[in-house]
Image (spheres, helix red, strand yellow):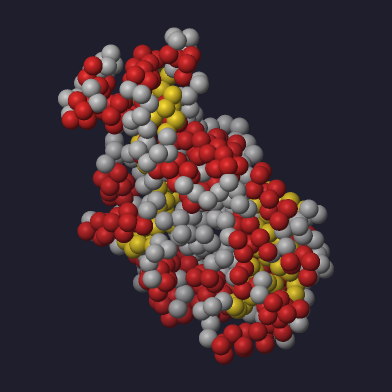
Amino acid sequence: MLQHVFGYPEFRGSQADIINSVCAGQDALVIMPTGGGKSLCYQIPALARAGVGVVISPLIALMEDQVNALKELGVRAGYLNSTLDANTAWQTENALREGEIDLIYIAPERLIQPRTLALLQQSPIALFAIDEAHCVAQWGHDFRSDYLKLNILHEAFPQVPRIALTATADERTRAEIISRLSLENAQQFIAGFDRPNIQYRINQKNKPKLQLLDFLQSEHKDSAGVVYCLSRKKVEETAEWLCTQGFHALPYHAGLPAATRASNQTRFLREESVIIVATIAFGMGIDKPDVRFVVHLDMPKSIEAYYQETGRGGRDGEPATALLLYGLEDIVKLRQMMASSDGNDNFKRNEQQRLNAMLGLCEITSCRRQVLLRYFGDTLVNPCGNCDNCLTPADTWNATEAVRMALSCVYRSGQRFGASHMIDILRGSENEKVRQFGHQALSTYGIGKHLTINDWRSIFRQLVALGYLDVDPDGYGSLRLTEPCREILRGEKSIELRRDKAPEKARATRKVMADIGDEDLPLWNALRKCRKDLADEHGVPPYVIFHDATLKELLSKKPLTDVELISISGIGDRKLEAYGEAFLDVIREFEYRGEM
């Protein structure tokens, strides 16, 4: 099935063990990084076992594309959700009862309805696959209340194996998934979390729009990518601004009309060189393999969210860049959001711990990938060589004297003001607010003139990240001293801080095109055009026809017969029959013209 249906010569990592376990009727919990091949872990057992594989997915907007992709492989697939008209839904339900479908996708809110459960009781079921299983965890970052009721599958169908899958789950989230889904007896498969093809870069904010523009123009002028923002307003403003700069950018957030969201998502999946600017409402389950960059213009609230969102880049294994720009204002905003949430004190405390871990990742001077993997219980022995701290090691300085000035200024001004006002005092500003509160009379007034505004911003940001200052979620971002700062104020401890790097042209990431020579470009472009024409004809994204990796292998091996073509990774029996001749014609034409 792997070779003839999906076109791959061998399994990756623990895929074979997972598939054998589920085929044998056992439950499984699978933690596997984005792009690691999770879908095969339930698709192949669904084909191998008698009955239909039921996939519970929160991604209504993507179900049609997922089903179309399976149909292109010759798999009998369907979905049940609110987008179907009554007649189509009836036909799909009837096919399900008759065992005429191999895989069916159902949203959790539909699955738990009595009518759907009754339908499943009348149907032959091969397995249940619970995709994006972290949605069941209240400690997770995409909590969905409907997922809490999915333990009904264990109660109503005790003999049917269940496989729960997600890309991101720390130890606490894994424990909650097991508990809520009654997977105590499930075999756990926790693959390595490393995505070595993603280059992680985290920079301080300094005119973020211009930083984004420089990044795109110097590295990803013609690439598809995702830009994440915290607010809907910022999403729309950023998308509009990128369009004025010559980029093809589209907004995506929950406040847009459903038709607009669906249209923008479809264009991102099916067109090339499209940038989607989005809130975290976008991306879960996105299968687009050639996303070359993921940019965060605001800091995510947890490492889980950061890892999940950056993991949408480079699913094809080719190089991708994850760029995060953050500043003190992000910390203030996130803490205010946490304070105003409906969660109980325990929930807020855990969210604060997650935010602190995210801050720690931003401020470290060592290998970021080592810290990122350690958070998920994974280990990387040596520095990765593919993050900003490895490529350009951070510069540190003895900031003890400046830190004492900063902490003293917070104390003497009554711990009632934000970082900007502290900087005005330290630099001796004569603005109205300083005069209004009489802060020109403080002993710290003007003692920090030797440092720039950006220097002080960096100091206050790092002091908050390191826990020496706290931000009062009062709406004003007031800074407060914490217990650990006493040692520094008393002169009992010195402190080193990282020196923020001056804005500069980022190190260019190798693109998919980089290893294609000039002599091969005409054939490469012809193969891509053939793929795009076929995709338009079949109404699917280009990557559903063939991934870039398959095109590159075609370019390298230049097959001229069906026998040679079937050996190419990503080409199974159905795709050979459907598309083989079209691509062979392109390659033969170049051979006959003497261009190979």
* Residue, far top: 491
Q: Quadrant of residue 456?
A: top left
Picture residue at 45% right of the left edge, 60% below the top: 282
Total number of numbered labels? Answer: 0
Quarter of the image where the C terminus is located: bottom left
Q: Quadrant of residue 371?
A: top right
* Residue, far bottom: 87
Whole-percent x, y for residue 81 in the image:
56, 76
Whole-percent x, y for residue 537 in the image:
43, 81
Whether residue 295 is situated above or below residue 550 in the rendered picture: above
Q: Which residue is at the front of the view, 456 or 472?
A: 472
Whether residue 586 is situated above or below residue 491 in the rendered picture: below
Picture residue at 35% right of the left edge, 38% below the top: 476
Whether residue 84 is situated above or below residue 11 in the rendered picture: below
Whole-percent x, y for residue 514 in the image:
39, 51
Picture residue at 81% right of the left edge, 64% below the top: 24
Q: Which residue is at the front of the view, 425 or 310?
A: 425
Q: Is residue 83 left or right of residue 22?
A: left
Picture residue at 61% right of the left edge, 32% below the top: 381
Q: Which residue is at the front of the view, 308 or 544?
A: 308
Whole-percent x, y for residue 90 in the image:
62, 88
Q: Is residue 64 visible?
A: yes
Q: Is residue 596 visible?
A: no
Quarter of the image where the N terminus is located: bottom right
